[in-house]
Amino acid sequence: MPVEIRELHIRVNVTSPQNEPASPGGAPSSAPGGNGAGGAGNEEIIAACVEKVMEILQNKTER
């Protein structure tokens, strides 16, 4: 006789890893600074994201 499952309850607890060192001030290390020193790094990340999005769009049109 088969068993039918009508409801499934999933509970997840998310915690941050304990072995990562905390950055000063409690802010994440990837947060943008007020002095604009990370501008070149941000531009590289944006360019990589745009390139990836263009690849995905091109793959969709080829299908």
Image (spheres, grey):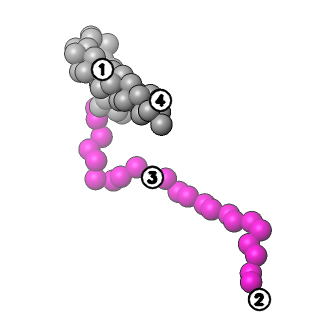
Give amino acid for label 3. Thr
Q: Nearer the viewer, residue 9 or 5?
A: 5
The residue positioned 28% from the left and 47% from the top of the image is 20
How packed is label 3: few (under 14 Cα within 10 Å), some, or many (20 or more)? few
Give amino acid for label 4. Thr
Q: Nearer the viewer, residue 58 or 26?
A: 58
Label pair 3/4, CB-CB below 8 angstroms: no
Does residue 4 appear left or right of residue 28 in this picture?
A: right
The residue positioned 33% from the left and 25% from the top of the image is 51
Could you tell me how far apart the alpha carbons at marks 1 and 3 are, in whole angstroms?
Answer: 31 Å
Give amino acid for label 1. Ala
Q: Which marked residue is nearer to the observer: mark 2 or mark 4?
A: 4
Q: Which residue is mark 4?
A: 61
Pick out the residue farthest to the bottom: 1
Q: Nearer the viewer, residue 10 or 20?
A: 10
Q: Position of residue 62 (x, y in %)?
A: 44, 32
Could you tell me how far apart the alpha carbons at marks 1 and 2 are, in whole angstroms?
Answer: 57 Å
Q: Nearer the viewer, residue 17 or 54?
A: 54
Label 4: which secondary element: helix
Q: Which residue is mark 3?
A: 15
Magenta segment, prevailing SS (helix, strand or loop): loop
**Magenta range:** 1-24
